[in-house]
């Protein structure tokens, strides 16, 4: 990643989590004042029950700062939020593994709020190939690398059995995937420029459980 | 939570994530030296490619500290790890929602490394009731509160449609659940003594995606 490109630095997970709330809120306001309508960080904070400092910090991560005594232009701020959330251009991901977890991810309706979509799934079980799951086609695993390359997809999701995770990961990278969301509890070996987010559902439940036992 | 009980404080998520590795490693060592066998933090660190300071810190969170020049008794350390991971006593959870995500969680085989088990699922769709999914029975939602109370289950997992999440949460608390793992993107209203871990899969993918776009 280019360390000089500070303005393009990814926003924090916490900020990112609040961006859909800002966007929904701004869109929900009645359009009374035309294109010049402004809104202050203070009034956003009040209506969303957030701290004003937090609102300013969140919005400064994705937009030009509000002007003193004027605030933000509502339309411009909506545009900035849409751009940050990519809800207009959209990001697509390829899913490896159309088992139970894969099917759950294909059917998950929360991705669209972030402009995200799983474009297709890939599985090496011939019985699953060419099936439609939640409207998405399951292709043969062999088609993974050529598909993502042709479709210019850079995000891969891995939900295959343990012993297939590394080879699927290698195929994704071969196809041009640069960010991998890995649901399999194995440590993937990847080149330095590839980002891996390890999803450990068991650990999440174990951590919650440890709080119960500590009470 | 009792703030005086420092020794029982939950270990950090990062430490917890490494505990199964320590346990697997210690169990895999040949038993050559009988019950008095000792092992140093340095040699554990070396074999697991971890920092020695980190190993000491991790192990001190769940065990008495190693003795100078002697280290840890291997058997005692295994016992401490098993107790911390609850692999001997086990923790059970109740799952609300036997849709695609619920079915994926029921079939997920990673929980056992932490001594965790989903005991049963509950769904208000009569077509799903009394089905077996990955060997677990799906009961009617009405049975949730009495079941968890009778079975002394304190962990609940919510994977129901959005508009049912709060009422399911209320039923769980009524049944004595004190920790909730919520996969539904709604903010649950709970009493102060209830722990909620909000799982936001869309946000996880969005955060990964934002890194790709920032490159």
Image (cartoon, coloured by chain):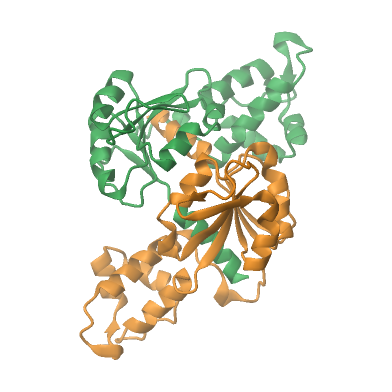
Chain colours: A green, B orange
Which residue is at the front of the view, A100 or A126?
A: A126
Q: Residue at x 65, y 44 (%)?
A: B124
> In the rendering, at what x and y percent does residue A74 appear?
68, 19
Res B2 quadrant in image: bottom right
- Please indicate whether residue A178 sits to the left or right of residue B171 in the image: left
Which residue is at the front of the view, A141 or B180?
A: A141
Res A208 quadrant in image: bottom right
> In the rendering, at what x and y percent does residue B56 appear?
38, 73
Q: Please say if A139 is above or below B190.
A: above
- Please indicate whether residue B12 sits to the left or right of residue B77 in the image: right
Q: Is residue B187 visible?
A: no
Q: Residue at x 62, y 67 (%)?
A: B151
Count of numbered marks: 0
Q: Residue at x 20, y 85 (%)?
A: B32
- Please indicate whether residue A57 sits to the left or right of residue A146 in the image: right
Q: Please say if A121 is above or below A73.
A: below
> In the rendering, at what x and y percent does residue B8 appear?
56, 74
Q: Quadrant of the C terminus of chain A?
A: bottom right
Which residue is at the front of the view, A205 or B46?
A: A205
Q: Please say if B76 is above or below B13.
A: below
Q: Is residue B77 visible?
A: yes
Which residue is at the front of the view, A15 or B48?
A: B48
Q: Please say if A207 is above or below B52.
A: above
Q: Residue at x 27, y 86 (%)?
A: B37
> In the rendering, at what x and y percent does residue A123 appear?
31, 34
Res B39 quadrant in image: bottom left
Q: Quadrant of the N terminus of chain A?
A: top left
């Amino acid at each position: 990643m280019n360390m000089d490109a500070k303005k393009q630095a990814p926003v924090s997970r916490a900020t990112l989590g609040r961006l859909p709330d800002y966007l929904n809120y701004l869109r929900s306001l009645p359009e009374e004042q035309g294109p010049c309508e402004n809104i202050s960080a203070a009034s956003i904070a009040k209506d969303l029950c957030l701290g004003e400092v937090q609102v300013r910090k969140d919005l400064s991560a994705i937009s030009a700062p509000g002007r003193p005594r004027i605030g933000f232009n509502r339309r411009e701020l909506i545009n900035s939020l849409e751009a940050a959330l990519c809800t207009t251009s959209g990001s697509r991901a390829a899913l490896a593994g159309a088992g139970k977890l894969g099917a759950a991810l294909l059917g998950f309706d929360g991705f669209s709020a972030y402009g995200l979509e799983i474009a297709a799934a890939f599985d090496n079980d011939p019985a699953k190939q060419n099936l439609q799951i939640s409207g998405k086609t399951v292709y043969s695993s062999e088609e993974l690398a050529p598909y993502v390359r042709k479709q210019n997809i850079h995000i891969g999701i891995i939900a295959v059995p343990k012993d297939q995770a590394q080879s699927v990961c290698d195929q994704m990278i071969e196809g041009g995937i640069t960010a991998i969301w890995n649901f399999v509890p194995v440590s993937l070996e990847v080149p330095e420029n590839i980002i891996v987010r390890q999803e450990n559902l068991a650990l999440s439940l174990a951590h919650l459980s440890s709080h119960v036992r500590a009470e």
